[in-house]
Amino acid sequence: MWTMEPLAKTTPSRRTLWQLVPQTLRYARFNRHEIAGSLGDLGTFLPLLVGMSAQNGLNFASALFFAGLFNIVTGLTFSIPMAVQPMKAIAAVALTEGLTTPQILAAGATVSLIILILGLSGGINWLNRIVPRSVVRGLQLALGLTLLMKGMQMVSATRQWWGLDSYLMGLVCAVIVLLLFFSRRIPAALLLFGIGMLITVIHQPTIWQSLGWGLTFPAWSPIAFNDFVTAFPKAALPQIPLTTLNSVIAVCALSVDLFPSRAADPRKVSISVGMMNLVACWFGGMPMCHGAGGLAGQYRFGARTNGSILFLGAVKMVLAITLGASLMAICQSFPQSVLGVMLAFSGMELALVCRDQTSRSDAFTMLLTTGVCLGLNNIAIGFVLGLAMAYCLKLGWFRLEDRGEDVHSTATPLPTTDASGSTPDSSDSATVNHSAGIPR
């Protein structure tokens, strides 16, 4: 009922990273197609980074630095344009429940440690089998809706009908996103980010004085034990099944479709996700992972090799080191109406992946999980109750279909992408339609 298609068997290389780097770099290309492809996942990255920096106090420079560093390490490890994107469940909880920066970092470290253990032990596929897809979709729907509502509240908080930071500006930004929804040349999030920066400068002309070249490097950011205790049920628990599904299982399956001769190995991907935040969390790095949606988005924009990832990582690191402190000041003054629209559309993309739950039992489980998460404002309880209901339906203790209906899930083994070629999770959760072979 909940099983997924087995991943294509790849033969993990036993060579060290340093031995693999020269071979991996042979695939790298640095042309306009790769540069354009590197922008394919900014629609997810920018809103969550700016949102957590402005709302939760996350260090913009440190987060940008480690995002770039992980891009480069990923580009040296994988020959495909493997995306590096925020852990969207953690980001959604942080933005809607006001987690502190140490709690955000603790959640990312906890998830990475568990994924690393599962990857090394081979437990990734086991966990994916025991957690029904309908429960995962329920978590994604709840997180997507909370992010959507948070974005709308931020636009509403401007309390102005007219002006550069107002309801009207929010409407204009929403129209821009819709007009550029299918654009392969102009990422809507990048354009909105530029509009927001322009409005910030117009509102505060003196902010230019804070811009200056200088060297800014990540600093030690201690995390208390209580931060781990608080973060686990709120943010880490809902992220774990999403990461196993999207960051490992789905991304490897998608890589088989797009790059049959260079498909990613699940164990290698698990170790990559695990090592990211175990290092970065102690220096203020935003929780990051890989993702099928990001891979599909970058492929759609033209990326075919790891050159796009290496280019993007270099740009991020240079900006973080030279302008990091200045960008943090601008980020804190970012217009609420623009940021709200960016977060709202990120939330909608995260929720839209749930449309593959077409049977009554799956839809019921998904909606129960979502309703409990939202109604009780407790994702952990929603996850447990959704899991319990799914197994009750599987064991036949309850029945929601007529006898003539198929009681099994009608969902496809892997969700299809949306019209833009990617989905957000990131949450992280999009994959390509297997019958199509490549994203639309």
Image (cartoon, rainbow, N blue to C red):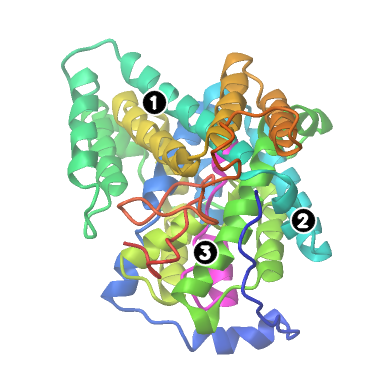
- In the displayed structure, 371 sits above or below 341; it is above
Q: What element does badge 3 sit on?
A: helix
Q: Closer to the observer: label 2 or label 3?
A: 2
Question: What residue lies at 75% left-to-right and 29% top-to-bottom?
Answer: 397
Residue assigned mark 2:
126
Does the magenta run of residues contain 84? yes
Give the magenta part as a residue range.
68-90
Residue assigned mark 3:
71
Which quadrant would residue 153 be assigned to in this image? top left
Does the magenta run of residues contain 183? no
Query: What is the crowding at mark 2: few (fewer than 14 residues within 10 Å), some, or many (at least 20)?
Result: few
Give the residue type at disc 3.
Asn
Q: How far is the residue under mark 2 from the one under mark 3? A: 28 Å
Numbered badge on residue 427: none
Query: What is the crowding at mark 1: few (fewer than 14 residues within 10 Å), some, or many (at least 20)?
Result: many
Q: Is residue 251 visible?
A: yes
Numbered badge on residue 151: 1
